[in-house]
Structure formats: C-alpha cells, structure tokens
Amino acid sequence: EERFHDLENMCEELVRENYHGKERVRKREEEILQRWRGVLELLDRHKTNLNMLCSLMAMLREIDTVMTSIEELQVNFQSEDVGPHLLAVEDLLQKQSLAELQVMSMGESQRRLGRQAQQYISNGHKEAPLLQTRLDQLNKAYDDLIESSKARRVRLDDARNFFQFLQDHEEEESWLIEKQRICKAGVTAKDLRAVLSLQQKHKALQDEMKARHPKSDQLCDAGRGLIGDKHPKSGEIQTCIDSLQAHWKSLEELAGLRKKQLEDAAEAYQTRRNDVDQVADTSWTM
C-alpha cells in the first residue's frame, strides 16, 4: 500500500513538472490503481468469506458439542433405575432436577444456534444444506431428549409415590400390630382400682384408634389413586391395602373383646367387694 502511495506521488510530481509523456503516465497510473483497488476488494471479500466460514465452523463445532451433551443426558434419562427405597429415589429426583436445568440450558443454545444459522441459510451460503441438516438433527435430538426427560420424571415420581406409600404402610401396620399386642394382653389386675386403671388406658387407646383411623383411610385412598393411575406396582399396592384393612378389623375386634374383659373383671371385683362389705357389716352387727 505504501508503494502504491509513492507511485501516486511520483505521478503527481511528473505532472507538475509538465513531463512530455504526462498523459501516458496518468493513464498508466489509473490502470495500476484500478487494479490495486480490485485487489483490495478481492481481499476484503476473501476476508469476509473466511470470517463467515470460521463462524460457520465454530457453529458446527458447537452443534456437535451440544449433540454430545444431549446423547450423554439421553443415556441417563433412559435408565430404568429408580432406587431400592424412598431415600434413593429422592436422591435420583434431585439429580433429575439438575439434569432438567441442563436441558433448559441446551434449549437456549439450540434456539440461539437456530437464529445464527438463518443468516447463512437465507443468504444461500454454499454450506447451507450441511448446516440445515445438522440443525435438523439437533432439533430432533433435543425434542427426543425432552420426551425422555418427561418420561424419566414420571418414572421417578411413580417410584417416589410407591416407596412413600410403602413407608407409610409399614409405619401404620407396625402401629396396628403393637396395639393388637396390647389388646391381646391378659387382664392381670389384682384389685378393682387396677382394673379401673386398665379401663382408663383402654379408653385412651380407643380414642387414639378413633383419631388414627382417618390417617389409614387416607393412606388407602392414596394407594387406590396409584392403582387408578395404572401404577406398575398396582398388585403390591392392593395387597398392602388389603393387609392394612385386615389389621384394622382385627384390632377393632380385639379392642372390643378387651373392653368386654375389663368390664367383666371390673364387675367381678365390684361384686366381690360388695360381698366383702356385706360380710363385714353382718359381723359388725353380730
């Protein structure tokens, strides 16, 4: 560029000096400068093309990177592992939430890449067909990932609901078995006062049963809801419901029987006490 600038200066000097061939020199200068400007235009165009190609290659590399990340997440979402218990599935649900945040981030990248690609596709760039193909692959992979993510979430939610149901059922059944054991205990009171104390405790147990029964009903309703939603463990859930109801029926029968036993014992002790009092009164009179 400096040399062509010098050439212009030399031409101007010859013209000023009124060189006899100045017209030929001027014409020659114009031809050379015109060719020089043509070279500069070609260079600018080439630079623009290289920059576009560089951006295109960077875009294709980013598409490949996003595709790789999608494939890795897809493997995770297709897993059938839901853990062996409630704590395990809750841990998997936390990981699922983090993975879903990654999916959202990939969605933003997908949309941004789509917008950037339009300038190449709409301008008819020679690599537009390749770019369109890669974008179509990305869009399909992302759509499949969304569906897999939703399916994985459903599996984990189903598992959590099932394990929560099992845990609640186990707690409820343990409570029922413990109360059954109490009701099966013999009446070992030595006097009327002890029997009356046992009756008060039994009344407290019956009140506790009355307050507890709605919780069991809610648990059974939750189980029936899972069955109604076609839960894959519906058979096991129904077995738990039947078992819980059977334990409640047994407890109510045992509680009624114990109430009767305590009433009979109280009546027997009261009768015996009355007899003793009557004998004492008779002896005092004599």
Image (cartoon, rainbow, N blue to C red):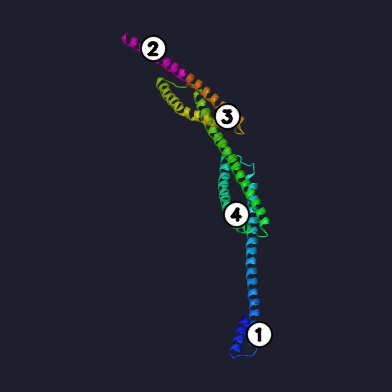
Q: Tag on residue 275? A: 2
**How far apart, in angstroms, are the residues tagged by discs 4 and 3?**
52 Å
Q: Tag on residue 240? A: 3
**How far apart, in angstroms, are the residues tagged by discs 2 and 4?**
100 Å
Q: Is residue 185 visible?
A: no
Is mark 2 in CB contact (under 8 Å) with mark 4?
no
Q: What residue appears at the point 43 percent right and 15 percent down from the top-left corner?
A: 268
Q: Is residue 115 visible?
A: yes
Locate residue 145, reporting x and y percent: 62, 47
- Please name which of the two marks, 2 or 4, marks the residue nearer to the observer: 4
Q: What residue appears at the point 55 percent right and 29 percent down from the top-left corner?
A: 224
Residue type highlighted by circle 2: Asp
Q: What residue appears at the point 48 percent right and 19 percent down from the top-left corner?
A: 256
**Residue indicated by mark 4:** 114
Instruction: For label 2, count other residues whose C-alpha is less than 10 Å away and answer few (under 14), some (14-19) or many (20+).
Output: few
Q: Earlier in the sequence, mark 4 or mark 3?
A: 4
**How far apart, in angstroms, are the residues tagged by discs 1 and 2?**
155 Å
**How far apart, in angstroms, are the residues tagged by discs 4 and 1?**
56 Å
Q: Main secondary structure of the magenta part?
A: helix
Q: Tag on residue 24? A: 1
Q: What residue appears at the point 58 percent right and 46 percent down from the top-left corner?
A: 96
